[in-house]
Image (cartoon, rainbow, N blue to C red):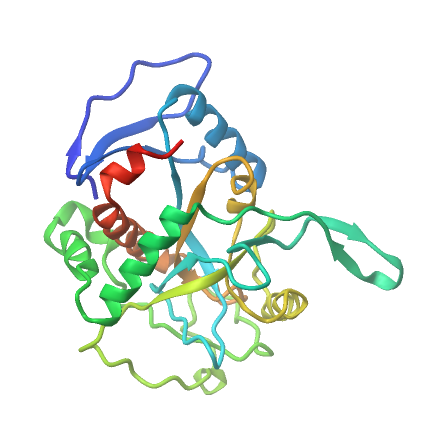
């Protein structure tokens, strides 16, 4: 998604992180990935800390990747959709669901508060949302890059793995995919109007914690405990929000249930990256430079 890629930095024995340097529109960008096999809030905090130490002029961060969607009657979230953290009256855009204390009677009381994203980033996502609703977004143009580059074929939308949402009470049959599952146990969802967009962007609260949610009952219980307005789950953002001004962008790769399938992960990651590129292109460079 970079317009231009810069030469890599020399190796550093004190910082094992591999950085990709480049430019998107007028903005210089540095990209870092968590080490393979290292997930969770602590790993994200460590990488972000090293990044800020090495690149002292960093103004904002984007936590871009995949997450587990929480479809509901209110939010028609599907695989490949994008969820963006945005504050509401109750949460600051990201809530850590597993930080708190156990109380008598088996109750869990969440403690602490996570900061919301910087005002400039929130203003920019409002602009992207407005353009999207008016049909002026260029998100699909960014995604077209994956279709045109044969080296990125694995990041295109899956055609052999259907997007199926099963009832919360129906567990996965032991197989690599859902080919042996009973499709009569799926929840009916009408086909989308592709004249609008096959991929939708959702704005609201993202739940962050240190465990992978692969059980629909657990998913629904946590969502209920958090007020019922959670759009997706992920595992890193809570480690950044209070120390690094950032926005969280997640592509939906599963529904946090036992039917979790890795086949959608690359496409979901590409969706999140395409949306982030849209943000950067809309963000005024003079306002970014004026941040302290």
Front-lying residue, 231 or 212? 231
Q: Is residue 262 left or right of residue 282?
A: right
Q: Is residue 79 left or right of residue 40?
A: left
Q: Residue at x 38, y 37 (%)?
A: 60
Above or below: residue 218 compared with residue 32: below
Front-lying residue, 281 or 186? 281
Above or below: residue 214 compared with residue 185: above
Residue 124 at x, y = what percent?
Answer: 31, 53
Q: Residue at x 58, y 69 (%)?
A: 216
Q: Is residue 128 visible?
A: yes
Q: Quadrant of residue 170?
A: bottom right
Residue 24 at x, y = what percent?
Answer: 20, 39
Q: Quadrant of residue 275?
A: bottom left
Quadrant showing the C terminus = top left
Above or below: residue 289 compared with residue 62: above
Residue 145 at x, y = what percent?
Answer: 14, 52
Quadrant showing the N terminus = top left
- The mark tally for this picture is 0
Front-lying residue, 77 or 292? 292
Above or below: residue 262 compared with residue 75: above
Q: Residue furthest left?
A: 148
Q: Is residue 176 visible?
A: no
Residue 235 at x, y = what percent?
Answer: 53, 48
Q: Residue at x 23, y 58 (%)?
A: 156
């Amino acid at each position: 998604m970079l317009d231009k890629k810069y030469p890599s930095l020399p190796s550093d024995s004190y910082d094992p992180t591999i950085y990709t340097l480049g430019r998107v529109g007028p903005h210089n960008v540095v990209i870092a990935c968590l080490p393979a096999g290292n997930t969770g809030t602590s790993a994200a905090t460590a990488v972000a800390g090293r990044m800020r130490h090495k690149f002292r002029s960093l103004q904002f961060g984007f936590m871009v990747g995949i997450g587990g969607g929480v479809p509901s009657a209110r939010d028609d979230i599907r695989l490949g959709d994008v969820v963006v953290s945005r504050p509401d009256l109750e949460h600051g855009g990201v809530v850590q669901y597993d930080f708190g204390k156990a109380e008598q009677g088996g109750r869990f009381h969440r403690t602490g508060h996570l900061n919301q994203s910087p005002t400039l980033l929130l203003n920019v996502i409002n602009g992207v949302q407005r353009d999207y609703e008016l049909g002026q977004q260029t998100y699909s143009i960014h995604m077209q890059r994956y279709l045109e580059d044969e080296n990125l074929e694995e990041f295109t939308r899956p055609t052999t793995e259907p997007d199926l949402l099963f009832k919360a009470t129906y567990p996965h049959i032991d197989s690599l995919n859902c080919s042996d599952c009973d499709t009569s146990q799926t929840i009916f969802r009408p086909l989308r109007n592709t004249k609008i967009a096959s991929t939708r962007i959702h704005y609201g609260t993202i739940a962050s914690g240190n465990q992978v949610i692969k059980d629909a009952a657990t998913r629904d219980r946590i969502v209920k405990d958090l007020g019922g307005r959670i759009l997706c789950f992920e595992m890193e953002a809570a480690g950044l929000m209070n120390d690094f001004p950032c926005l969280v962008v997640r592509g939906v790769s599963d529904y946090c249930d036992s039917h979790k399938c890795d086949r959608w992960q690359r496409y979901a990651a590409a969706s999140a990256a395409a949306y982030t590129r849209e943000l950067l292109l809309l963000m005024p460079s003079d306002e970014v430079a004026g941040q302290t």
